[in-house]
Amino acid sequence: MNISRRRFGKTVAAAAGVAFASVSLPRFVLAQSPTASLLKFPPKFLWGCATASYQIEGGVKEDGRGPSVWDTFSHTPGKTFRGDTGDVADDSYHLYKEDVKLLKDMGVTVYRLSISWSRIFPNGTGQPNEKGLAYYQRVVDELLKNNIAPYITLFHWDLPQALPGGWQSRDTSKAFADYAAYVSKQLSDRVHDFFTTNEFVCFTDLSYKNGQFAPGLKLPDKQVNQVRHHGILAHGLAVQAIRANARAGTQVGLAENATVHVPVIESREHIEAARRATRERNAPFLTAVMEGKYTDGYLEREGTNAPKVEAGDMKVIGSPLDFVGLNVYTPEYVRADSSRDGFVVVQRQTSAPHMASPWLYIGPEVIYWAVRNVSDIWKPKALYITENGCSADDELRDGRVEDTDRVMYLRNHLTHLHRAASEGYPIKGYFLWSLMDNFEWADGYSKRFGLHYVDYKTQKRTPKLSAEWYREVIARNAVE
Ligand code: PNW
């Protein structure tokens, strides 16, 4: 039986009460007692880190890699901070053994990395490039040698530039399925877990509607909805392609940054409002994937701008998954109201605290509600936190980075994740974003999310205080 955190707390308090009554120990003894202060995770809980190909690899012209939309975009003046590009990034293309060692030193047992599609298919389709595949085989083998299980994301935004029309074209969804089929066939002898796509909203809306990510377009709503449809269709087709081509037992899911709705007060009406908001406000993405249909609300709202859907698409999109991965960063607060939707998203206070990235508002309960809302609505078999972490103004002083603010951020999030685990939600593991500082997309190298500080001039990696802290968490399987 799962004992809830609250009940656990009461039990501990009661036991402590007895101890206090008989020997009247000073209070701080309780605070230092390991059993009273440690929040233990389930015995087989998986602790990991996450990265993405274009953000860490560099080696963009190496071994026959074709260009991706992010090469083109980052080399276009004005698109990224100070014109930063992923040409070199962390040079993990060459330094991957060192990076595996960083993982090993922290004691992580799972690592989420992504594959650059254009290393494998330089033109997006056609003949595979064996040298590109060989790189990932080397990385995977190095991980396995160190008892770290690779979890592979097939698409983390670095779309092959050569694909005509990018995600505006339905053919791109099919090309993605072919690529997924090939990679999963080649790697599933050593890789057990695959994620299809990472964060639909980022490679659709942010890329084709807001223009802040590659390819930097600002299309009208109707075309954006079609791009979104091609994104989720690509995911569904890839799920089927992996099931048809990978070794039996291969596990498939996706990594999605669903908008997370937190009830303003934990009461029944607001909890229900947050649930309704989760379904409706993720309608073009996770809701469609989990339900195999667009909600009536979405179709009504979009009207004539709704995407063109071909027969069979929604069934493909709703292909059953083995797990759902959630990238969790920032909360939206919701309250119940009497409107037709039954919820209202509360405007953020101007005083709401955030980390170094201005969008990264802090609300650690977000991770609990991410797991709970998704579980309560769709009952996935298993869940992972596929990303969680933060940017901070890290500075190397006397060889150290004392990122106490990142530790604060992480500690609080893990406390709320612990609550989800102790209430019995099927949360299997946690991938911290990120192993090391890297190319933070349009923000270039100006924002650092790593547990390891990277000196981009020398490529030296230095563990931050947070890496030391994470190692303790993993060793104890608990957060303090
Ligand atoms: C995720 N936002 O992206 C990505 O999966 C990572 O590649 C990225 O480095 C990480 O989070 C940190 O940003 C996001 O503006 C990018 O809300 C932007 C947003 C959210 C997530």
Image (tube, rainbow, N blue to C red):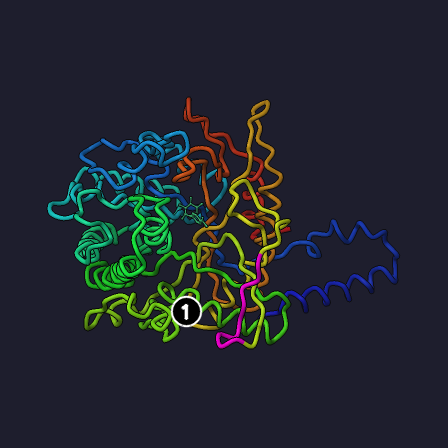
Main SS, magenta region, reads loop
Query: Around disc 1, counting alpha carbons within 10 Å, would you say few (fewer than 14), some (14 to 19), or many (20 or more)?
Result: some
**Which residue corresponds to the image point at 28% horizontal and 61% vertical from the top-left?**
222
* Rendered view: 205 above or below 419: above
At mark 1, the secondary structure is: loop
Asked whether 248 falls inside the magenta stretch, the response is no
**Which residue corresponds to the image point at 19% horizontal and 73% vertical from the top-left?**
311
- Side of 139 where 415 appears, left or right: right
- The x, y position of residue 306, in whole percent, is 29, 67
Residue range (magenta): 339-347
Residue 194, visible in the rendered structure: no
**Which residue corresponds to the image point at 39% horizontal and 32% vertical from the top-left?**
98
- Side of 130 where 281 appears, left or right: right
**Which residue corresponds to the image point at 48% horizontal and 36% vertical from the top-left?**
447
Quarter-of-image position of residue 175? bottom left
* Rendered view: 280 above or below 444: below
Quarter-of-image position of residue 88? top left
The residue beneath circle 1 is: 380
- The x, y position of residue 13, in whole percent, is 76, 63
